[in-house]
Image: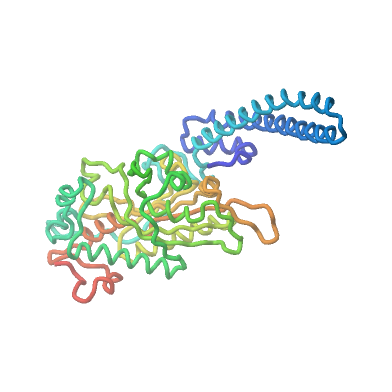
Amino acid sequence: MLTIPFIKDHRDTVLKGLEVKNFKNPELIDQIIELDNKRRALQVKTNELQAQMNKLSKEIGQLFKSGEKEKANQVKEQTTGIKQELETMEQDLQRANERMNELLVQVPNVPHPSVPGGNSEADNKEIRSGGSIPSLHEGAQPHWELGKKYKLIDFDLGVKITGGGFPVYRGKGAKLQRALIAYFLDQNTDAGYEEILPPLMVNEESGFGTGQLPDKEGQMYHVTGDNLYLIPTAEVPVTNIYRDVILDAGELPIKNTAFTPCFRREAGSYGKDVRGLNRVHQFDKVEIVQIQHPSNSYNALEEMVSHVEQLVISLGLPYRIVQLCGGDLSFTSALTYDFEVYAAAQDKWLEVSSVSNFEAYQSNRLKMRFREPGEKKTQLTHTLNGSALALPRILAAILENNQTPDGIKIPEVLHPYMGAGNEMIT
């Protein structure tokens, strides 16, 4: 959530940024500024009335103490009208504050100046790429057919148990999934991230803090009886660890990593783009989160992008990194890089990671602050996160790209996690 001082001090910059993000209601900015001026005027008047009340109350006490009861009662009568006016002013101020919150949550984060304009993923900007696209043998199959052939993934069984978008991994498919999770976590902890095992459900306050609520309420599974939400990403519970916390500047940066299943209702159900593991309702993901000093958050973003890039390179997957345009940027993000890997049997690129800097947008909602040494005033931290990595499409690309007439080769970095004799799936 943008702060009111930021909006007022940088009105033109905010409007220009929201235009890049294709925001449809720019009039909200001037409404916020006008409402804040009204709130301030109400607050000044309320303070004046309260000071007048305090002065009269003190005078009444002194009059009673000196025995001037009749005069004290006369002054007391004067306070009746002031009390009523003060009560009305306080109600008006409360309504203005509530309206301000309603307006602020409708305004997305302002994109970084480097974010290109555009309407969709077609307008995203490729930053760099790496790896070689493999030439597959005749008769090569997409991962959903390989999963069936080698008894790695059972999509029909998932439909039976739950419904579409809930695959069942079995045998070496389950082992490969577990190997990827362990490998990603080990790489992340070696890079200085503390491992967290968070809850898989969060309350409304947590969903609001990281921006999923109210913006993405329809995309989250809601446990109505307890008013809890299944997490769409580990970013939500991990970042909320620091909600309502004041950190010392010396504690920054904070770096966490977490493996969790993730749950998303928005997954489609039809067409080639959602076949197999391309888009599912439940999937495993390893996340990295950083709480950063504002002066270092963009250095940290580049560090996170480099870290994810090394993970993809180590798996031998052809990849490209794209910077999202304004129209493809999320509601809360200031700058996002997407990683895509190439799935050869499908002849298509699959997104496997988003690495984002939210600047102070989440922190303002979370009331996550820090204090410099010797300072009383606090500042908002910056928050960042990224997938390192999301497993379904990584697994799909590994299966498709590494298939041979004799079986599927397992990337060398995963051999220690798969165990002897499991270097190839046959």
Pick whichever, 123 or 12, lies toward us.
12
Pick whichever, 167 or 323, lies toward us.
167
Q: Quadrant of residue 123?
A: top left
The residue drawn where x is 15% and y is 52% is 157
Residue 3 spot, x, y in % from top left: 59, 41
Residue 420 spot, x, y in % from top left: 21, 76
The residue drawn where x is 84% and y is 36% is 65
Horizontal relation, residue 370 to residue 268: left or right = right
The residue drawn where x is 18% and y is 51% is 158
Pick whichever, 180 or 397, lies toward us.
180
Q: Quadrant of residue 317?
A: bottom left
Q: How is the image coloured?
A: rainbow
Residue furthest to the bottom in view is 420
The residue drawn where x is 45% and y is 61% is 256
Total numbered badges shown on the rendered structure:
0
Residue 106 spot, x, y in % from top left: 49, 35
Query: Is 5 above or below relative to 261?
Result: above
Residue 286 spot, x, y in % from top left: 36, 59
Horizontal relation, residue 87 to residue 151: left or right = right
Q: Quadrant of the C terminus?
A: bottom left
Horizontal relation, residue 43 to residue 356: left or right = right
